[in-house]
Image: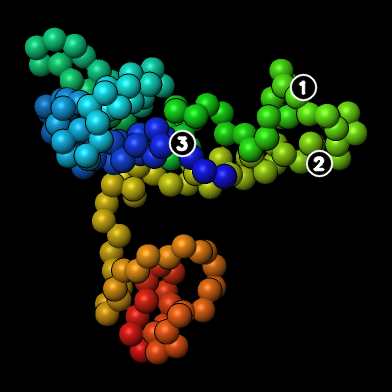
Amino acid sequence: MRLSSLTDYAVVMLAAAARHCGGAARLNATLLAEETGLPLPTVQKLVSKLSAAGLIESARGTGGGFRLSRPPAAITLAEIVEAIEGPIALTACVEPSAHECAIEGDCRVKPHWNVVNGAVRGALANVSLASLSSPIPLARGAVPIAVETLGDTPSPNPSREREGNLVRNA
């Protein structure tokens, strides 16, 4: 499962907006495009989609711009994903209007997909925009590393101790 680039960019843009949260002034697309490195047309498209989803409030004209509609702690990753991608559904067969599957009538897994979709949505709903916009604190003595896998993967260097996405020199 992979989110679209547009959804990824929406998260990046809203995280940047969240770091500006609290000021009385509205943000503008040009400022966020410069700050995030996203193309201005992409930011403008995202402003439209996120405004339609109620995640940001926008105003045109003098003094216009946009701001988050709620505090960053009250906006979830699930809401951002759904604003861009639509409802979280790993398979199309859970949608009442979808009848594209050749084995739909005999499928014994179909009844379980709503539980799976709910679990994925729940996991995303537990991540707030506030947490995505704040820096990750490093444990004392830890250095950030790039990690491609999840779980308890052994460290490539036995003299180091793994702590999630961090490695501590032993």
Could you say whether the residue bearing mark 2 is in a helix, strand or loop?
loop
Q: Which residue is mark 1?
A: 99
Quick one: which residue is furthest to the left in this view?
62
Could you say whether the residue bearing mark 3 is in a helix, strand or loop?
loop
Q: Which residue is mark 2?
A: 109
Question: Where on the picture, by quarter, is residue 47?
Answer: top left
Q: Which mark is residue 4?
A: 3
Kindly identify the amino acid type of the residue bearing the numbered disc 3. Ser
Relative horizontal placement of residue 20, taking residue 119 as reference (left or right): left
Relative horizontal placement of residue 58, taking residue 114 as reference (left or right): left
Percent position of residue 117, x then y: 64, 39
Residue name at image x 31 percent, y 40 percent: 12
Q: Nearer the viewer, residue 89 or 124?
A: 89
What kind of colouring is applied to the model shown? rainbow
Q: Pointer 1: residues within 10 angstroms few (<14), some, or many (20+)?
A: few
Residue name at image x 37 percent, y 76 percent: 167
